[in-house]
Amino acid sequence: MRSRGGLYSDDHAGFDRPRRHTRPRTKDRPDYSEAAVARVITVDRGRYRLQLDGRMVSATKARALGRAGVIVGDRVRVVGDTSGEEGTLARVVGVEERETVLRRTADDDDPFERPIVANADQLAIITALADPPPRAGMIDRILVAGWVAGLDPLLVLTKADLAPADEILAAYEPLDVPVLTTQPGAELGELRERLDGRTTVFVGHSGVGKSTLVNALIPGLDRAVGVVNETTGRGRHTSTSAIALALPDDAGWVIDTPGVRSFGLSHVTPAGVVAAFPDLAASTVDCPRGCHHDSAAAGCGLDAAVAAGRLPPARVQSFRRILDARMIAEREAHRGLE
């Protein structure tokens, strides 16, 4: 329910019909429209670190906000002791309306969405070219989640000293996804330009070098850097929770997230994938009823648009690779429910 302060979730929700054998202490609902607004930097075991007017504030959360009511990147209303002094604790009482929310599910048959980050406007998918090798399926899934969330994608390829990037570049160039390559000790000028003035969430498989990049972008930060197991090829989780970090000289924000080994898309429909590509969606208007626009679709308007020269074949092929992955995920989810 919306309040006068523009909140979509606040203490007002706690003022419903009283439980049996209880009496409400007051009929007056709290008004937090004048409460200070802070940014959630990180969440750790029920404690929230907030940035408020240039200082760090520790806070708890009002019970009415629920278990998952506040995530990194949220702009929140906060009351109580907001001095930030040692031993003080403020209270988060409301969450401002979110501009974007990046979500994922643990697996494709998991019905529960997990919001990862709020209010980012750019998604940087960090992928190593080797050690561990790139996983196109993982990249595609994260891209879909980012597009559906309304984030601008950016693909950052690390460890370019170990393997060439030609195959990855060819796969994502038709989708107009900017691709940057880097290697240890390389100049990060182009990446800094892409991050300037943006709030960018870093997402990637464990061990691909996210923390190494963050340390290079923010000197003195010293985020823990993981290693890759030589036998399994898997990286070790070095970050246990997301954290928002300010870039030097007010050049934007980076939100570093824990490494992921899977990225479920049960919260994304195939129609949502199509809607993320307005130029392609326009060519599906005359498709047969029930057309899914995937590689197996018969009489799809995308094929007609390619034949007429209105769409580049490579772009449609790349789009269908991503859509096919989502269709497979949906079929697997349905099979798991049978």
Image (spheres, rainbow, N blue to C red):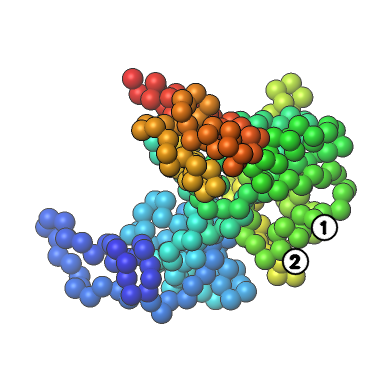
Could you tell me residue 261's position as x and y percent?
60, 33
Identify the residue at horizontal 46%, vertical 61% (top origin). 98
Kind of residue indicated by mark 1: Gly
Farthest left residue?
A: 21
230 relative position to 176: left or right: right
* Disc 1 element: helix
* Quarter of the rendering occupied by the N terminus: bottom left
Above or below, 177 relative to 23: above
219 relative position to 55: left or right: right
Q: Which residue is mark 1?
A: 189
Could you tell me residue 109's position as x and y percent?
42, 29
Marks 1 & 2, CB-CB < 8 Å contact: no
* Disc 2 element: helix
Circle 2 packing at 10 Å, graded few (<14), some (14-19), many (20+), is: few
Q: Which of pointers 1 and 2 lies earlier in the amino acid sequence?
A: 1
Circle 1 packing at 10 Å, graded few (<14), some (14-19), many (20+), is: few
198 relative position to 18: left or right: right
Asked whether residue 90 appears in the rendered view, the answer is yes
